[in-house]
Each structure stands twice: as C-alpha cells, then as structure tokens.
Amino acid sequence: MLGGALADRFGRKVIVLFGLVFSALSSVTMGLVDNLNVFYILAVVVGLLSDVAGPAWQAMVADILPEEKRAEGFSVMRVAGNLAWIVGPSIGGLMAARSFLLLFVMDDVSSLITAVIVYRMIPETMPETEEDKDAESIIQTLAGYRKVIADRLFMAYILTSMLMLVVYIQMYNTLSVYLRDVHGVSPQGYGLLLTSSAITVVFFQFWVTRRVKKYSPMLMMALGSGFYMLGFSMFGFVGAYFFFVFAVVLITIGEMIVMPVSQALAVNFSPKDMRGRYMAVFSLAWAVPATFGPWAAGLVLDNYDPNFVWYAAGIICFIAVLGFLWLNQSTKERFAALPTEEPAAN
C-alpha cells in the first residue's frame, strides 16, 4: 500500500529502483543470518519492503502501453514469470547443492543487474497531470486511498476477484498436501503438474490473449472463473493421475484468460494519476486469499472430508462467475467513457 502511494507521488522508476536495491540487500542479509529468531525479524522487514515496487511495476506497464495493448503487455510479463518458474528452481537447486549462501548472493547480483538495466534503459513513465504534485504531501497521497475505497465498482471487482483467487491459490499449497495424503501422488508428480502448467503458459499465453482481447474483459473474467470452477471441482470427484492432469489443463486455460485481463481491468478502473494506488489495492485481491485461503482449507483437510475443499471451490468460483457477469453489465457505461490517452514515450 505504501509502494502504491509512493509510485504516484515520486514516480515509478525511483520506487522500482528502491525495490530492486532493497531486495538485493535483504537477500544477501538473509543468506548471512544463522539465528532463526533474527531470521524471523528479518522476514518481517523483507515482507514489508521487498515488494514495495510491485504497484510501480504494474503502473509502469500501464503507462507505457495504450489501453488496447495492456492485456498483451501483462501477458508478456506472465510469460517471463513462467519462464523463470521453469528455469529458476533448477538453477537454485544446483547453487544450493554447492552453497546456500551462493544462492542468496546470486539473487543479490541478479537484482542489482536488473536495477542497472532499469536505471540506464527505462525512462520515468508516470503521466503528466495538471495537478501540481510537488504541492501534495505524502500524507495527502496516502489519504487518496479513501477515493479508491469509495470506488464501489472497483471494490466490487476486488471482492469478486478475491473469491476467484481464494480458490486459485489452493493450487500452490493445499493441492500438494491433498494429492499426497489422499491419492498418494509423489512430490515429483505434483511438481510435474506445476511445470506442465508453466510450460503451457509459455507456449500459449500470447495466442490466448490475442483471442480474448476482442471480447468484454468482464465476460472473459467470468469465462476464466468458469474454467477454475470445472478444474478445481474435478479434484473432488476423480482419483486417477490422468484426470488430475486434465484438471490442471482446465485451470491453466482459465489462468491464461484471467491473469492478464484482470490486471488490465484494474488499470482501466484507475485515473491515470492514481494508478499506483489502484494497483496496490488490486494486490489485496491476492494478498487476502493467500493469507486466509490455505489456513481455511487446512482446517477442512484436517477435520472433515478432504473432498469438501474442492466442492467448496466449485461453489465459490460459481459465485465469482455470477459476480463478474453482474460487473459486466454495471461497468459498461464507465468503461465506454474512458478517455483516450497517449502512452508514455519509450
């Protein structure tokens, strides 16, 4: 939340650079700490500041690209992230086999290299406004979150996204425990499911994004949530590994539809001088489900029929589908009135 306000107050580039340098320093510090209690304290500090530049990165993509290309721009970011997902753990495993400290040091080096690239090659992208931003204090900028929270349609979008994502987040924690304990799937089998999902995104994300961009974004959010509903529900009804693979394919199709579109939609809701703050609030659609979703699913796994997790997932996604369909009707007038703006100079 602080990062979003800072990105709107001081610009995107300086906050991105701060985030990269802080990430580098925190990474090498974590590698040097050998006391668990100190590590906990450091983890809190890192958690507060390591992603402070997240809203600035997202706002920068929105600044650079015109509205009709933003979903494709976020698709590029997703493909890059999935390539890192495929390659990164393997490199990390090789480094950790030699030295865990080497892993942290190389993370430090990669962050600093990225910072140099940003400093030398990427200009400030924050749109110019008629307001005199220098006259606005950081307290006033933070107070601007009241305007974001008062945006009822945007908050309805955030709440609906939370319902969808509280299901999606189970893919990366609850599902591994469920497959191991209930169906005897090995860690390698679960890892293969995630790797195949990432590879699918790398090869098909651009193709999917180009196909869906001609349709209403909210309808595409409903469609993607429908694929989540089918995929996650399947885990409660099937028992063969082949069907688990098929369920992950359905989920990945939904993911390729939803992820770039959801970020582009969040930008469309925001005034150009408040993109950092809107993207920061949008990040809550991930943070809140990630905080409570695995805990709630764990209670069900430990105390009730484990399949209830996936039955509930299907019901929650169905509610999200209805929510996005309602938003499709409710936001038509607002999005039709979006002003045309020039993208930031490259």
Image (cartoon, grey):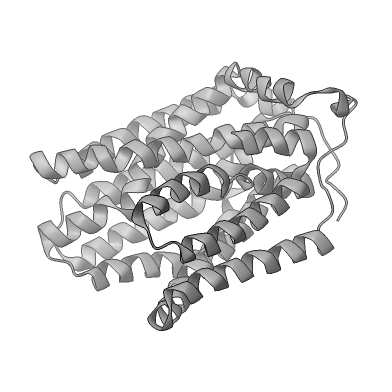
Instruction: Please tell me whether residue 26 is drawn above or below residue 108 in the rendered image.
Output: above
- In the rendering, at what x and y percent does residue 38 appear? 41, 52
- In the rendering, at what x and y percent does residue 59 appear? 70, 43
Q: How many marks?
A: 0
Front in this rendered view, residue 207 or 62: 62
Q: Is residue 56 left or right of residue 248?
A: right
- The answer to whether one can see residue 329 in this image is no
Quadrant for the C terminus in the image: bottom right
Instruction: Please tell me whether residue 216 is drawn above or below residue 238 in the rendered image.
Output: above
- The answer to whether one can see residue 162 in this image is yes
Front in this rendered view, residue 3 or 147: 3
Quadrant for the N terminus in the image: top right
Residue, x 43% and y 56% (percent of image)? Answer: 253
**The quadrant where residue 302 appears:** top left
Residue, x 17% and y 39% (percent of image)? Answer: 299
Q: Is residue 57 left or right of residue 301?
A: right
- In the rendering, at what x and y percent does residue 337 appear? 74, 25
- In the rendering, at what x and y percent does residue 67 appear? 73, 42
**The quadrant where residue 110 appears:** bottom right
Instruction: Please tell me whether residue 40 is drawn above or below residue 267 in the rendered image.
Output: below
Residue, x 12% and y 61% (percent of image)? Answer: 183
Front in this rendered view, residue 229 or 76: 76
